Structure formats: structure tokens, C-alpha cells
Image: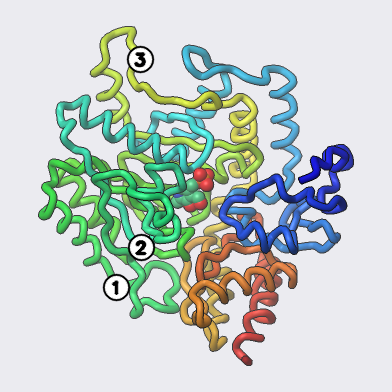
Amino acid sequence: MGKAKHVVANHDPIAAPNALHHHWLPFTGNREFKSDPRLFVRAEGMYFWNHKGDKILDGCSGLFTCAAGHCRAEISEAVARQLNQLDYTPSFLRSHPLSFELAERIADLTPADLNRVFFVNSGSEAIDTAMKICSAYHRARGEGQRYMFVSRERAYHGVNLGGTSLSGMVKNRESFGPSLPGVVHIRHTWLPENRFVKGQPDHGAELAEDLQRMVDLYGGSNIAACFIEPIAGSTGVLVPPKGYLQRIREICDEHRILLVFDEVICGFGRTGKAFGAQSFGVIPDVMTMAKAMTNGAQPMGAVAVREHVHDTIVEAAPRGAVELFHGYTFSAHPAACAASLAALDIYEREDLFSHAAKLSDYFLDSVLTLADLSVVSDVRGFGLIAGFDLLPDSVRGARGHEVQKRLFDAGLHLKTTGDAGILAPPLISEKCDIDEMCGILRDVLGEYAAQ
Ligand SMILES: Cc1ncc(COP(=O)(O)O)c(C=O)c1O
């Protein structure tokens, strides 16, 4: 295949034949994409622009990342300033002031005493880091036999080996051989009787008893942690039934199982408060976060843990010794810290979490109006995230994929998983943006209703 070096020089990859071959895109049908690429070349506020010059409304905050809208100058300027002053610091045995400032700001946002913050570069790294912290914690307190992790069907916890094992999505697991031993899955919380419910459904708290069944089957003293997304996001927005998370917390407490909330999507205002933990009134022991942490402008994630979890691990190590043999070359990268601090400033200054809470009713009511389309078999949501299911075509997921392309061509970017569509507009959205989003959805989905 030709090297097409000139392509790099003129930044116009689709002008040159074969120039798309080298980049192997993740979670993408590469052959289909390269025959009809959908490239973004610019973004601002609520919109992307593609390489053909079309304006596309961002119905998914990029990928749950750009909560304050795109291309916020405050963030890009902070990153540029930081890179010009101190481009890189190793985070082993060294650090820089912004990492401490950011950890303190994150601790201000987290509930209770989830005040100790370990920096990583993605949600997947946050998950694998959280698993290792849970294991290290139990070992430090003399219960190293706790080798098991409980997760859920239809969970998505990223793609590293730990997260792949925890995830409850067949396609993300089946090609990769046996995953981590000791990971078991309880049922997801989608129930047919909860279809078309706005907010937390009434039915399903009893599904939390599945955790008790795992305790009864494997022994609670063998389980290190239970991983839960407050709202399961990527598999179609499964809102926790009323009382469900509270009951999970009780069972964890009874058996000294650590409760980990994966807040990679829910974090930073998506549910109308800083984290899902606050919106649902349940305090976990460990929280993972990423995505909107930098408004998507730099890769970054973090794990926040309760003080006693941190202290137990740290105090178990001899003085002067490394306490946790874990970390990444780019942990707490200065440019990512600068981006995150600037993003948190915007969230606070513009009161975006409250704005999301105020807009939520309008957003959810608007998405629920799609219920009258015959192709739509469920709509659900909470805060500024909603999911809808489409009746499947003969091949599962084919319709969702096609709808995603048609919506893009009609001017709306969203995420689909199988036959579910996921909407998570930027927190800066106004009613007119919601109207535009739902108008495009109605036009495109209406065509299926008529078929
Ligand atoms: C809940 C959850 N956890 C973890 C991840 C993985 O994050 P990343 O893609 O940054 O590795 C995601 C990504 O969508 C997620 O939604």
C-alpha cells in the first residue's frame, strides 16, 4: 500500500487514495467506514462540522465527554499555557502542583470522604486500577482471599482485561478467550414493565437480591468488590429502579464487599448532580471517572476512594516503601490536569450541573414523545441521558446501525449500541437544542414507522 506521505502534509486524508487504510478504527466496521467515511473536521458549542461542510448537532456530547460544549477557549488556552511552561512530569517519585490542586477539586465534588484520588488516562484504566485497589485493600487488611468481583449483565466497564471481564456485553467478550477468573455477573435492571418510564422505575429493587445469591453461592468473604454503573450508560441507559442501589449498598456492607460506582458516564453533571452517587443518594467506597473530566479535551480518568481504603493500603506498607505498585507514564499529565481544572471552572461558573437538572424534565418529556412511533419499543432516561429501543430488523443491531448513519446524514450525532439509541446532549443545551434533536429523530425514525 502506498505511503501517501503528502497526505500528512496537506491534512486532507480523503483526497488521496488509500490514505484511510493505515488507521484501524476502534469499535468500527473499518471496511464500511473507509468506503464512506464520516469525518469531523471542526466543532463549536453544540455542533460538529463534517468534511463536506455539513453542520451536525451533537446529541451525545461527543462520547459523553464534551459536557460544556465543544472547543471551549478557556480549556485550550490552559492546555497551551501548560505545555509551554511544563510539558511533562513523570508521576512516579515526581509530580507538579496542578495534580494536587486537581485532586483537591475532585475531592470537593465527590460525596462523603471519597477524597483520595489516583489519576489515570481513560475510563478503562480507571476500572482496572479500581480492581487492583480493591484487591490491595483487602490484602492489606488481612483478607487477601477475596479474589472475586461481581458485575452485571449489560454493564460496560471499558476494554482493558479487567473491564472486559466485568462487562456484560457478549460482543465485547466472545472474541478474546477466557477472561479474568472470579468475575461473576448478576442480572441487569431492564424490565418490560418499566418501559416508557421517566426517571427511576418503580419495579426491580428486588434484582439487588442477586448480589445476595452470589454471596450465598460463593461466600461473601471471597468477594472483593461489586462494580455498578449508577446508570448503565453504553448498553442503552438502564436507570436503577427505586431502592435498588440502596439494597446493593446494604448487602455490600453486611459482607464487607467494596461497592464501586463506575461514574465514567454519570460523573460531572450528567445526572443533574456532580455524580450519580449524589443523585441516587448512595455512597460507594470507590468511584471511577473519566470522559467529561477534561470536557473531552485531553485523555484523563481517575479513581476516587474513601479515606480508610487509601489509609489501609498506605499504612500496611513499610515506611518509605512504595505502597501501591501501580501507575501510568501519563498519570496526572500536566496538560490533562490543566484541561480538567479549566473544565471544572466552567462547570462551576456556568452552574452546568444545576442547569442539567433543570433541563432534565423538558429533555426527558421531549424524548418520551417518540413513544408514539411504532418502531420505538421503549424510551427511558434520567438527568440529561436517555435511551430508546428500536424494534429489531431480521438481524439484531442492523437497524440501530442504519439509524445511526441516517441520523448523521440528517444532522444528528448520537451513539447506538445494538438497536438502542443513546442521547446525552451537552449540559449547555437549551430547549431549542432539544427541540432540534427530537425533530431530527422524529423525521428519521418516522420513516421506519411508516415502513
Ligand atoms: C461506564 C464506563 N466505564 C468505562 C468506560 C471506558 O472508558 P474509556 O473508553 O475512556 O476507556 C466507559 C466508556 O464508555 C464507560 O461508559
- Which percent across, then down, holds residue 225? 26, 43
**Is 352 on the left or on the right of 196, as rendered?**
right
Amino acid under label 2?
Pro
The crowding category of the residue bearing disc 3, from other C-alpha atoms within 10 Å (few below 14, some 14 to 19, many at least 20), is few
User: Residue 30's quadrant in the figure?
Assistant: bottom right
Q: Residue at x 14, y 51 (%)?
A: 215
Secondary element at tag 1: loop
Residue 416 visible from this viewpoint: yes
Q: Nearer the viewer, residue 369 or 5?
A: 5
- Which percent across, then down, holds residue 14? 82, 53
The crowding category of the residue bearing disc 2, from other C-alpha atoms within 10 Å (few below 14, some 14 to 19, many at least 20), is many
How far is disc 3 from disc 1 in space, using C-alphas?
A: 47 Å
Q: How many marks?
A: 3
Q: Which residue position is annotated with label 1?
A: 203
User: Residue 406's quadrant in the figure?
Assistant: bottom right
**Quarter of the rendering occupied by the C terminus:** bottom right
**Is 140 on the left or on the right of 443, as rendered?**
left
Secondary element at tag 3: loop
In primary-sequence order, the first of circles 3 and 1 is 1
Q: Which residue position is annotated with label 2?
A: 240
Q: Are marks 3 and 1 in contact (CB under 8 Å)?
A: no
